[in-house]
């Protein structure tokens, strides 16, 4: 006797055989079933793979976003507005933790940062992996995280703590090891209730418009969605970056040319890593001002965009100067130490510090 198929298997068949785009309601329904444990890991993996192979539609992205946000635990409110910096990940290029380094530099430059992130699903080292390695306690209670945001100017919101039902999908995601719709949507789901700005890097040009369409209906006052033309999910100094910029209700498209901002042009190989150990070292060296100029400048570029989004500067050039100064004067290093002192083990950070060396 043939066993009955689950509702999710019916949707998978439509996506695979008909290349059908699911509606927002169908996508919310599918994720609700996955979140509540009604589907097997094999079926979940098949669903995520089917969407990735077909190409995720606008309604599927929006439906996933609504489903994830509908189940999250809110964080805050903080004493003032905050921003976030993150990439969608899943790109073939494996870089050091550019957005995490930029977040620390941005906070050191006076802009409050509620960094939202997770462990890597497909690469050697995600933002949570890096911060844990240098002493951050991923299980820090919310009151300590909030105190850090209010008093240090930066905190880290470990995604599983705020999206607990994602655990029902994590095994399937980890087994797949590829970019899925959750890589696209995850960065959009920062649980901080008074987030006002965001810099989001994407690794596919098509995602510029798709993500902007979701974010323009959020509560953010400013955001940038950035695509590097050679595939990095960051603003980069390897080539031009295309950016959709939302500022107080108005959308515009701009090109950022690194050579216009006195940034050292870089090769891809200068920014990519092959191991978790190398990722930790390069990220730390970028924060401490020990890294080669190519590595330093990609962090400075992303921090400058974040400062613009946070309304700390009026122009990218001003943000670049401010970010550079706060690396050179040791403020970025000091902010990382304060974050770890507030929410972790400072001795662990000091142990990592002792392995660093100036390389320029």
Image (cartoon, rainbow, N blue to C red):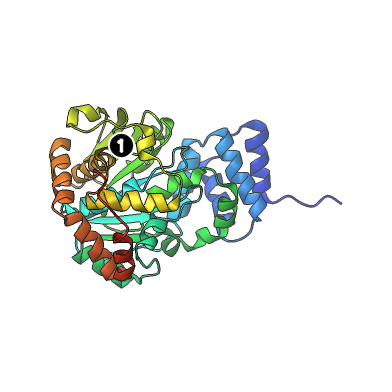
Q: Is residue 161 left or right of residue 28?
A: left
Instruction: Give neighbour class at mark 1: few <14, some 14-19, many 20+ (Cα, 10 Å).
Output: many
Residue 185 appears left or right of 355: right
Q: Residue at x 53, y 61 (%)?
A: 167
As drawn, is 305 to the left or to the right of 170?
left
State how many labels appear.
1
Task: Tell which of 264 and 121 is nearer to you.
Answer: 264
Camera-nearest residue between 240 and 53: 240
Quadrant of the snapshot with the C terminus: top left
Give residue 221's quadrant in the image: top left
- Determine if residue 339 is in view: yes
Q: Residue furthest right?
A: 1
Q: Position of residue 234 (x, y in %)?
A: 34, 39
Of residue 74 and residue 179, the one placed in the foreground of this image is 179
- Residue pointed to by mark 1: 235
Asked which quadrant contains residue 49, the reply is top right
Q: Secondary structure at mark 1?
A: loop
Taking the spot 38% from the left edge, 33% from the top edge, the residue there is 268
Location of residue 260 with respect to 351 vertically, above or below? above
Q: Residue at x 27, y 52 (%)?
A: 357
Residue 276 lies, in percent from the top left, at 44, 52
Q: Position of residue 125 (x, y in %)?
A: 43, 52
Residue 301 position within the rendered picture, expressed as x and y whole percent measured from the top left: 24, 39
Q: Does the rendering let one see residue 126? A: no
Toward which corner of the image does residue 75 lie, by quadrant? Answer: bottom left
């Amino acid at each position: 006797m043939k066993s009955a198929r689950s509702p999710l298997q019916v949707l998978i068949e439509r996506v695979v055989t008909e290349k059908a785009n699911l509606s927002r309601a169908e996508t919310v329904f599918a994720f609700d079933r996955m979140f509540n444990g009604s589907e097997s890991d094999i079926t979940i993996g098949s669903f995520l793979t089917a969407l990735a192979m077909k190409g995720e539609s606008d309604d599927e992205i929006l439906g996933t976003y609504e489903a994830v946000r509908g189940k999250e635990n809110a964080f805050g409110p903080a004493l003032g507005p905050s921003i976030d910096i993150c990439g969608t990940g899943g790109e073939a290029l494996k870089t050091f933790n550019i957005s995490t380094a930029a977040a620390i530099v941005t906070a050191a430059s006076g802009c409050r940062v509620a960094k939202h992130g997770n462990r890597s699903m497909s690469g050697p080292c995600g933002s949570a992996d890096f911060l844990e390695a240098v002493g951050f306690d991923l299980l820090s209670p919310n009151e300590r995280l909030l105190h850090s945001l209010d008093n240090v100017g930066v905190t880290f919101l470990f995604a599983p703590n705020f999206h607990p039902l994602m655990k029902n999908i994590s095994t399937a995601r980890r087994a797949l090891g590829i970019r899925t719709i959750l890589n696209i949507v995850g960065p959009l789901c920062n649980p901080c209730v008074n987030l006002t700005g965001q810099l989001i890097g994407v690794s596919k040009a098509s995602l510029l418009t798709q993500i902007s369409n979701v974010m323009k209906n959020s509560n953010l006052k400013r955001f940038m969605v950035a695509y590097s033309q050679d595939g990095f999910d960051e603003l980069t100094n390897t080539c031009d970056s295309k950016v959709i910029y939302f500022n107080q209700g108005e959308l515009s498209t701009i090109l950022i040319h690194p050579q216009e901002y006195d940034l050292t042009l870089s090769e891809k190989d200068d920014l990519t890593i092959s191991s978790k150990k190398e990722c930790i070292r390069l990220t730390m060296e970028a924060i401490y001002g020990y890294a080669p100029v190519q590595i330093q400048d990609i962090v400075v570029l992303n921090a400058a965009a974040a400062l613009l989004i946070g309304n700390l500067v009026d122009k990218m050039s001003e943000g670049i100067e401010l970010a550079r100064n706060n690396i050179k004067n040791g403020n970025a290093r000091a902010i990382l130490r304060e974050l770890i002192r507030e929410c972790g083990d400072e001795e662990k950070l000091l142990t990592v510090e002792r392995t660093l060396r100036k390389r320029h």
